[in-house]
Amino acid sequence: MSGLALDGKKINQDILNELRPRVEALQAKARPPALAVVLVGDDPASHIYVRNKIKACQDLGIRSIDAAPAAGISTDELLRLIRDFNRDRQVDAILVQSPLPKHIDEKQILLAIDPAKDADGFHPFNVGNLVANRPAPRACTPAGIVEMLKRYRIPLAGKRAVVVGRSDIVGKPMALMLLHENSTVAICHSKTHDLPAECRRAEILVAAIGKPALITREHLSPGVVVIDVGMNRLNDPAVVLRLFGHDPRRLAAFEKNGTTLIGDVDPLAMQEISSAYTPVPGGVGPLTIAMLMANTVQLAESHLASVSGEC
Ligand code: NDP
Protein backbone atom coordinates (compact mmCIF):
# COMPACT_ATOMS: atom_id res chain seq x y z
CA MET A 1 0.00 0.00 0.00
CA SER A 2 1.21 3.47 -0.80
CA GLY A 3 0.25 6.70 0.98
CA LEU A 4 -1.53 9.54 -0.77
CA ALA A 5 0.90 12.16 -2.08
CA LEU A 6 -0.42 15.55 -0.95
CA ASP A 7 -0.18 17.93 -3.88
CA GLY A 8 1.26 21.25 -2.72
CA LYS A 9 1.26 22.67 -6.24
CA LYS A 10 -2.49 22.16 -6.59
CA ILE A 11 -3.23 23.69 -3.19
CA ASN A 12 -0.93 26.59 -4.11
CA GLN A 13 -2.97 27.19 -7.28
CA ASP A 14 -6.28 26.91 -5.39
CA ILE A 15 -5.14 29.46 -2.79
CA LEU A 16 -3.83 31.87 -5.46
CA ASN A 17 -7.07 31.54 -7.45
CA GLU A 18 -9.05 32.42 -4.32
CA LEU A 19 -6.82 35.45 -3.70
CA ARG A 20 -7.21 36.81 -7.24
CA PRO A 21 -10.66 38.45 -6.78
CA ARG A 22 -9.49 39.96 -3.48
CA VAL A 23 -6.48 41.50 -5.25
CA GLU A 24 -8.78 42.82 -8.00
CA ALA A 25 -11.14 44.31 -5.42
CA LEU A 26 -8.24 46.11 -3.71
CA GLN A 27 -7.05 47.40 -7.06
CA ALA A 28 -10.55 48.65 -7.91
CA LYS A 29 -11.00 50.38 -4.54
CA ALA A 30 -7.53 51.87 -4.12
CA ARG A 31 -4.39 50.26 -5.54
CA PRO A 32 -2.90 46.77 -5.82
CA PRO A 33 -1.42 45.26 -2.66
CA ALA A 34 2.30 46.00 -2.38
CA LEU A 35 5.04 43.79 -0.93
CA ALA A 36 8.55 45.11 -0.29
CA VAL A 37 11.11 42.34 -0.72
CA VAL A 38 14.53 42.96 0.79
CA LEU A 39 17.31 40.71 -0.43
CA VAL A 40 20.77 41.47 0.96
CA GLY A 41 23.86 40.23 -0.86
CA ASP A 42 24.19 37.43 -3.36
CA ASP A 43 23.41 34.09 -1.69
CA PRO A 44 22.35 31.97 -4.72
CA ALA A 45 19.60 30.03 -2.88
CA SER A 46 18.10 33.28 -1.54
CA HIS A 47 18.08 34.71 -5.05
CA ILE A 48 16.06 31.72 -6.27
CA TYR A 49 13.57 32.00 -3.37
CA VAL A 50 13.15 35.74 -3.93
CA ARG A 51 12.75 35.32 -7.69
CA ASN A 52 9.94 32.82 -7.07
CA LYS A 53 8.24 35.16 -4.60
CA ILE A 54 8.42 38.09 -7.00
CA LYS A 55 7.07 35.93 -9.81
CA ALA A 56 4.12 34.87 -7.63
CA CYS A 57 3.42 38.58 -6.94
CA GLN A 58 3.49 39.38 -10.65
CA ASP A 59 1.18 36.48 -11.52
CA LEU A 60 -1.34 37.60 -8.94
CA GLY A 61 -1.22 41.36 -9.61
CA ILE A 62 0.58 42.21 -6.37
CA ARG A 63 3.13 45.02 -6.74
CA SER A 64 6.57 43.92 -5.54
CA ILE A 65 9.08 46.56 -4.56
CA ASP A 66 12.50 44.97 -4.73
CA ALA A 67 15.35 46.25 -2.62
CA ALA A 68 18.68 44.47 -3.13
CA PRO A 69 21.37 46.20 -1.08
CA ALA A 70 24.94 44.90 -1.39
CA ALA A 71 26.19 42.35 1.17
CA GLY A 72 28.30 45.09 2.84
CA ILE A 73 25.28 47.12 4.04
CA SER A 74 25.44 47.89 7.76
CA THR A 75 22.72 47.03 10.29
CA ASP A 76 21.99 50.78 10.66
CA GLU A 77 21.60 51.29 6.94
CA LEU A 78 19.32 48.28 6.67
CA LEU A 79 17.27 49.55 9.62
CA ARG A 80 16.83 52.87 7.79
CA LEU A 81 15.57 51.03 4.70
CA ILE A 82 13.05 49.06 6.77
CA ARG A 83 11.84 52.22 8.56
CA ASP A 84 11.33 53.92 5.20
CA PHE A 85 9.13 51.01 4.12
CA ASN A 86 7.30 51.17 7.47
CA ARG A 87 6.45 54.85 6.83
CA ASP A 88 5.54 54.39 3.18
CA ARG A 89 1.75 54.19 2.89
CA GLN A 90 2.12 52.59 -0.54
CA VAL A 91 3.72 49.51 1.07
CA ASP A 92 1.46 46.93 2.77
CA ALA A 93 3.93 44.19 3.64
CA ILE A 94 7.68 43.80 4.13
CA LEU A 95 9.75 40.66 3.77
CA VAL A 96 13.45 40.42 4.61
CA GLN A 97 14.93 37.28 3.05
CA SER A 98 17.07 35.27 5.44
CA PRO A 99 19.82 34.41 6.00
CA LEU A 100 21.29 37.88 6.31
CA PRO A 101 25.08 38.32 6.17
CA LYS A 102 26.70 37.47 9.51
CA HIS A 103 27.65 41.06 10.41
CA ILE A 104 23.99 42.11 10.41
CA ASP A 105 21.95 41.84 13.58
CA GLU A 106 19.04 39.80 12.18
CA LYS A 107 16.96 39.99 15.39
CA GLN A 108 17.14 43.79 15.36
CA ILE A 109 16.06 43.87 11.72
CA LEU A 110 13.05 41.62 12.37
CA LEU A 111 12.08 43.77 15.36
CA ALA A 112 12.21 46.91 13.21
CA ILE A 113 9.50 45.68 10.81
CA ASP A 114 6.13 47.23 11.62
CA PRO A 115 4.04 44.27 12.92
CA ALA A 116 1.20 45.56 10.72
CA LYS A 117 3.46 45.01 7.67
CA ASP A 118 5.03 41.75 8.81
CA ALA A 119 4.62 39.54 5.71
CA ASP A 120 6.37 36.55 7.29
CA GLY A 121 4.71 36.74 10.71
CA PHE A 122 8.09 36.53 12.46
CA HIS A 123 7.83 39.73 14.55
CA PRO A 124 7.58 38.88 18.29
CA PHE A 125 4.32 40.86 18.46
CA ASN A 126 2.79 38.52 15.89
CA VAL A 127 4.37 35.47 17.52
CA GLY A 128 2.50 36.61 20.66
CA ASN A 129 -0.69 36.82 18.61
CA LEU A 130 -0.10 33.27 17.44
CA VAL A 131 0.42 32.05 21.02
CA ALA A 132 -2.85 33.77 22.02
CA ASN A 133 -4.56 32.48 18.84
CA ARG A 134 -5.48 36.02 17.78
CA PRO A 135 -5.72 37.11 14.12
CA ALA A 136 -2.34 38.25 12.73
CA PRO A 137 0.04 37.30 9.94
CA ARG A 138 1.22 33.75 10.57
CA ALA A 139 4.54 32.13 9.66
CA CYS A 140 3.96 31.03 6.07
CA THR A 141 5.32 27.46 6.03
CA PRO A 142 3.36 26.09 9.02
CA ALA A 143 0.26 28.11 8.05
CA GLY A 144 0.43 26.53 4.60
CA ILE A 145 0.73 23.07 6.12
CA VAL A 146 -2.40 23.54 8.25
CA GLU A 147 -4.22 24.91 5.21
CA MET A 148 -3.25 21.85 3.18
CA LEU A 149 -4.24 19.38 5.91
CA LYS A 150 -7.64 21.07 6.19
CA ARG A 151 -8.20 21.13 2.43
CA TYR A 152 -7.43 17.39 2.28
CA ARG A 153 -9.85 16.96 5.21
CA ILE A 154 -7.21 15.26 7.32
CA PRO A 155 -8.58 15.40 10.86
CA LEU A 156 -6.38 17.17 13.41
CA ALA A 157 -8.54 17.45 16.53
CA GLY A 158 -7.55 14.92 19.15
CA LYS A 159 -4.75 13.50 17.00
CA ARG A 160 -1.27 12.92 18.37
CA ALA A 161 1.04 15.27 16.43
CA VAL A 162 4.82 15.17 16.73
CA VAL A 163 6.86 18.08 15.36
CA VAL A 164 10.57 17.39 14.94
CA GLY A 165 12.40 20.73 14.97
CA ARG A 166 11.86 23.80 17.14
CA SER A 167 12.98 26.70 14.96
CA ASP A 168 11.19 30.05 15.23
CA ILE A 169 10.14 29.93 11.58
CA VAL A 170 8.83 26.35 11.30
CA GLY A 171 8.89 24.02 14.31
CA LYS A 172 7.56 26.28 17.08
CA PRO A 173 4.80 28.01 15.09
CA MET A 174 3.84 24.61 13.59
CA ALA A 175 3.39 23.13 17.07
CA LEU A 176 1.28 26.10 18.19
CA MET A 177 -0.91 25.97 15.09
CA LEU A 178 -1.53 22.23 15.55
CA LEU A 179 -2.34 22.91 19.20
CA HIS A 180 -4.90 25.51 18.11
CA GLU A 181 -6.40 22.82 15.87
CA ASN A 182 -6.77 20.71 19.03
CA SER A 183 -4.06 18.18 18.23
CA THR A 184 -2.08 16.79 21.15
CA VAL A 185 1.37 18.07 20.34
CA ALA A 186 4.90 16.99 21.21
CA ILE A 187 7.98 18.89 20.02
CA CYS A 188 11.24 17.00 19.48
CA HIS A 189 14.73 18.39 18.85
CA SER A 190 18.38 17.45 18.83
CA LYS A 191 18.39 16.69 22.58
CA THR A 192 15.34 14.41 22.48
CA HIS A 193 16.02 10.93 23.87
CA ASP A 194 14.89 8.09 21.63
CA LEU A 195 13.57 10.12 18.70
CA PRO A 196 12.28 7.01 16.86
CA ALA A 197 10.04 6.05 19.81
CA GLU A 198 8.70 9.62 20.12
CA CYS A 199 7.98 9.74 16.38
CA ARG A 200 6.27 6.33 16.36
CA ARG A 201 3.60 7.78 18.68
CA ALA A 202 2.64 10.28 15.98
CA GLU A 203 -0.54 10.13 13.94
CA ILE A 204 0.70 13.33 12.29
CA LEU A 205 4.45 13.73 11.98
CA VAL A 206 6.05 17.00 10.86
CA ALA A 207 9.78 16.83 10.09
CA ALA A 208 11.47 20.26 10.00
CA ILE A 209 15.06 19.37 10.72
CA GLY A 210 17.28 20.10 7.72
CA LYS A 211 19.00 16.67 7.70
CA PRO A 212 18.52 14.49 4.60
CA ALA A 213 16.35 11.43 5.32
CA LEU A 214 17.02 11.52 9.06
CA ILE A 215 13.54 10.11 9.60
CA THR A 216 13.55 6.45 8.54
CA ARG A 217 11.30 3.41 8.73
CA GLU A 218 11.93 2.97 12.44
CA HIS A 219 10.36 6.42 13.10
CA LEU A 220 7.07 5.73 11.29
CA SER A 221 3.91 3.96 12.44
CA PRO A 222 1.63 2.48 9.79
CA GLY A 223 -0.93 5.04 8.60
CA VAL A 224 0.88 8.11 9.93
CA VAL A 225 0.44 11.39 8.00
CA VAL A 226 3.93 12.68 7.22
CA ILE A 227 4.68 16.33 6.46
CA ASP A 228 8.23 16.63 5.21
CA VAL A 229 9.36 20.26 5.43
CA GLY A 230 13.05 19.56 4.82
CA MET A 231 14.75 20.84 1.67
CA ASN A 232 18.20 19.32 1.40
CA ARG A 233 20.45 19.02 -1.60
CA LEU A 234 22.12 15.68 -2.40
CA ASN A 235 25.23 15.52 -4.59
CA ASP A 236 26.70 12.12 -3.67
CA PRO A 237 25.71 9.48 -6.28
CA ALA A 238 25.99 6.61 -3.76
CA VAL A 239 23.60 8.33 -1.34
CA VAL A 240 21.20 9.19 -4.17
CA LEU A 241 21.23 5.56 -5.34
CA ARG A 242 20.58 4.31 -1.79
CA LEU A 243 17.65 6.68 -1.22
CA PHE A 244 16.14 6.83 -4.72
CA GLY A 245 17.05 3.41 -6.14
CA HIS A 246 13.30 2.74 -6.46
CA ASP A 247 12.72 5.86 -8.58
CA PRO A 248 14.22 5.65 -12.10
CA ARG A 249 12.93 9.12 -13.05
CA ARG A 250 14.70 10.70 -10.11
CA LEU A 251 17.91 8.82 -10.87
CA ALA A 252 17.78 10.00 -14.48
CA ALA A 253 17.24 13.61 -13.39
CA PHE A 254 20.16 13.32 -10.97
CA GLU A 255 22.32 11.89 -13.75
CA LYS A 256 21.49 14.96 -15.83
CA ASN A 257 21.75 17.69 -13.17
CA GLY A 258 24.32 16.25 -10.74
CA THR A 259 22.13 17.22 -7.78
CA THR A 260 18.70 16.46 -6.38
CA LEU A 261 16.44 17.65 -3.57
CA ILE A 262 15.47 15.46 -0.65
CA GLY A 263 13.45 16.09 2.48
CA ASP A 264 14.10 15.07 6.07
CA VAL A 265 12.25 11.77 5.61
CA ASP A 266 13.36 8.63 3.76
CA PRO A 267 11.21 8.95 0.62
CA LEU A 268 10.43 5.26 0.04
CA ALA A 269 9.66 4.56 3.71
CA MET A 270 7.35 7.57 3.78
CA GLN A 271 5.46 6.41 0.68
CA GLU A 272 5.13 2.83 1.86
CA ILE A 273 4.21 3.34 5.52
CA SER A 274 2.20 6.59 5.64
CA SER A 275 -1.48 7.10 4.79
CA ALA A 276 -0.58 10.49 3.29
CA TYR A 277 2.66 12.42 2.83
CA THR A 278 4.12 15.53 1.25
CA PRO A 279 6.64 14.74 -1.51
CA VAL A 280 9.85 16.73 -1.87
CA PRO A 281 9.76 18.73 -4.07
CA GLY A 282 6.12 19.66 -4.72
CA GLY A 283 4.70 19.23 -1.21
CA VAL A 284 5.33 21.93 1.39
CA GLY A 285 7.46 24.32 -0.72
CA PRO A 286 4.66 25.74 -2.91
CA LEU A 287 2.46 26.36 0.16
CA THR A 288 4.97 28.75 1.68
CA ILE A 289 4.71 31.13 -1.27
CA ALA A 290 0.92 30.86 -1.39
CA MET A 291 0.68 31.86 2.27
CA LEU A 292 3.09 34.76 1.74
CA MET A 293 0.69 36.03 -0.90
CA ALA A 294 -2.26 35.43 1.45
CA ASN A 295 -0.56 37.40 4.24
CA THR A 296 0.19 40.28 1.86
CA VAL A 297 -3.40 40.47 0.63
CA GLN A 298 -4.74 40.27 4.19
CA LEU A 299 -2.41 43.07 5.34
CA ALA A 300 -3.42 45.23 2.35
CA GLU A 301 -7.11 44.71 3.17
CA SER A 302 -6.48 45.69 6.80
CA HIS A 303 -4.62 48.82 5.70
CA LEU A 304 -7.41 49.81 3.34
CA ALA A 305 -9.97 49.26 6.09
CA SER A 306 -7.97 51.41 8.54
CA VAL A 307 -7.48 54.20 5.97
CA SER A 308 -11.22 54.13 5.15
CA GLY A 309 -11.91 54.33 8.88
CA GLU A 310 -9.73 57.46 9.11
CA CYS A 311 -11.79 59.32 6.46
P1 NDP B 1 16.73 25.00 11.79
O1 NDP B 1 18.13 24.58 11.49
O2 NDP B 1 16.48 26.39 12.24
O3 NDP B 1 16.12 24.00 12.88
C1 NDP B 1 16.32 22.63 12.79
C2 NDP B 1 15.72 21.96 13.98
O4 NDP B 1 15.97 20.56 13.85
C3 NDP B 1 16.32 22.39 15.32
O5 NDP B 1 15.28 22.63 16.24
C4 NDP B 1 17.18 21.21 15.73
O6 NDP B 1 17.22 20.96 17.14
C5 NDP B 1 16.45 20.05 15.08
N1 NDP B 1 17.38 18.94 14.85
C6 NDP B 1 18.59 18.98 14.24
N2 NDP B 1 19.15 17.76 14.25
C7 NDP B 1 18.29 16.93 14.88
C8 NDP B 1 18.31 15.57 15.21
N3 NDP B 1 19.34 14.77 14.89
N4 NDP B 1 17.25 15.04 15.87
C9 NDP B 1 16.19 15.83 16.19
N5 NDP B 1 16.13 17.14 15.89
C10 NDP B 1 17.15 17.70 15.25
O7 NDP B 1 15.89 24.66 10.47
P2 NDP B 1 14.52 25.28 9.91
O8 NDP B 1 13.41 25.02 10.86
O9 NDP B 1 14.73 26.65 9.43
O10 NDP B 1 14.33 24.38 8.61
C11 NDP B 1 14.23 22.98 8.68
C12 NDP B 1 14.19 22.40 7.29
O11 NDP B 1 13.04 22.90 6.61
C13 NDP B 1 15.39 22.80 6.40
O12 NDP B 1 15.69 21.73 5.53
C14 NDP B 1 14.84 23.96 5.59
O13 NDP B 1 15.51 24.11 4.34
C15 NDP B 1 13.43 23.53 5.39
N6 NDP B 1 12.49 24.63 5.13
C16 NDP B 1 11.63 24.45 4.09
C17 NDP B 1 10.69 25.41 3.80
C18 NDP B 1 9.76 25.17 2.69
O14 NDP B 1 9.11 26.10 2.25
N7 NDP B 1 9.64 23.93 2.20
C19 NDP B 1 10.60 26.66 4.57
C20 NDP B 1 11.50 26.70 5.71
C21 NDP B 1 12.41 25.70 5.95
P3 NDP B 1 17.91 21.99 18.19
O15 NDP B 1 16.94 23.12 18.34
O16 NDP B 1 18.06 21.18 19.41
O17 NDP B 1 19.20 22.42 17.56
Image (tube, rainbow, N blue to C red):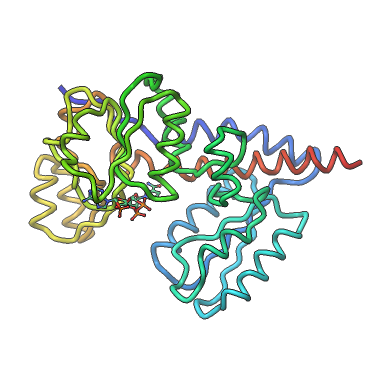
Image location of residue 292, percent across then percent down = 54, 45
Image position of 189 (left or right of 142): left
One can see residue 240 in this view: yes
Residue found farthest to the right: 311
Seen at 23% across and 59% down, the residue is 257
One can see residue 4 in this view: no
Image position of 46 (left or right of 110): left
Q: Quadrant of residue 249?
A: top left
Seen at 40% across and 67% down, the residue is 44
Residue found farthest to the bottom: 72
Looking at the image, is 34 positioned above or below residue 66? above
Seen at 20% across and 61% down, the residue is 258
In the rendered view of the protein, which quadrant contains the N terminus?
A: top left
Q: Quadrant of residue 302?
A: top right
Seen at 68% across and 51% down, the residue is 34
Image position of 275 (left or right of 238): right
Image location of residue 125, percent across then percent down = 60, 48
In the rendered view of the protein, which quadrant contains the C terminus?
A: top right
Looking at the image, is 129 positioned above or below residue 152? below
Image location of residue 148, percent across then percent down = 42, 30
In terms of depth relative to the viewer, which is nearer, 110 or 223? 110
Looking at the image, is 118 positioned above or below residue 4? below
The number of numbered discs placed on residues in the rendered structure image is 0
Image location of residue 242, percent across then percent down = 8, 48
